[in-house]
Amino acid sequence: MRPPRIPNLLPPQRETIYLVTVCVEGRRKTLDNPEAWGACRSAWKRLDRWNVWCAVAMPDHLHFIVAPFQRREESLSAFLKWFKRWFNEEIEPDWKWMEGGFDRLLRNNESVAGKWEYIRQNPVRAGLARTWEEWPYKFARNDLPR
């Protein structure tokens, strides 16, 4: 049983932004290839209630920073459900996603740019690339909030 969702207590003028991680079941290394990355990008484009600010695909998990376009209370669970469904429709993988995902609501003192710096360095920390720029399975919008 999952713990209850913590309510969003940020001030109304503060944008609701999440750092999200989703993992492959059994941590199989299946996401660091052009086909999977294309399916991720395609699925994110279909999520019309959400803005995907930036993302990095690691071999067995994804990190992304997202924000709902309109309603602060938009369901992150629904976001993950539809992302995984549309991803699976695109490439019909022979593996499964772990249930749900891990998310962190960014607070006033946490910047999107700082979190982006952290997740984009994951391939470097894992020894998959010498610099984050070399890693092909990442993107960030030009208008990334600070």
Image (spheres, grey):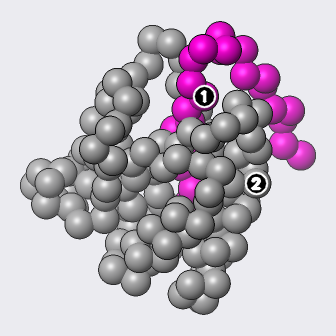
Looking at the rendering, the stretch of residues picked out in magenta corresponds to 1-26
Identity of the residue drawn at 58% across and 75% down: 87
The residue singled out by tag 1 in the image is: 16
Q: Is residue 18 magenta?
A: yes
Amino acid of disc 1:
Thr
> Mark 1, residues whose alpha carbon is within 10 Å: few (<14), some, or many (≥20)?
many
Vertical position of residue 144 compared to residue 80: above or below: above
Residue 101 in view (yes/no): no
In the picture, which quadrant includes the C terminus?
A: top left
Q: Is residue 144 magenta?
A: no
Of mark 2 and mark 1, the one earlier in the sequence is: 1
Vertical position of residue 56 compared to residue 28: above or below: above
Q: CA distance from mark 2 to mark 1?
A: 16 Å
Q: Name the mark on residue 78.
A: 2
Nearest to the observer: residue 15 or residue 62: 15
* Direction front: furthest residue: 70
Q: From the top left corner, tell me how far across and down residue 16 is, in percent.
A: 60, 28
Please indicate whether residue 77 sits to the left or right of residue 49 in the image.
Answer: right
Q: To which quarter of the image does residue 84 belong?
A: bottom right
SS at badge 1: loop
Residue 90 in view (yes/no): yes
The majority secondary structure of the magenta stretch comes to: loop
Nearest to the observer: residue 57 or residue 18: 18
Total numbered circles: 2
Amino acid of disc 2:
Ala
Please indicate whether residue 108 sits to the left or right of residue 11 in the image.
Answer: left
Q: From the top left corner, tell me how far across and down residue 125 is, in percent.
A: 24, 47
Please indicate whether residue 70 sits to the left or right of residue 93 in the image.
Answer: right
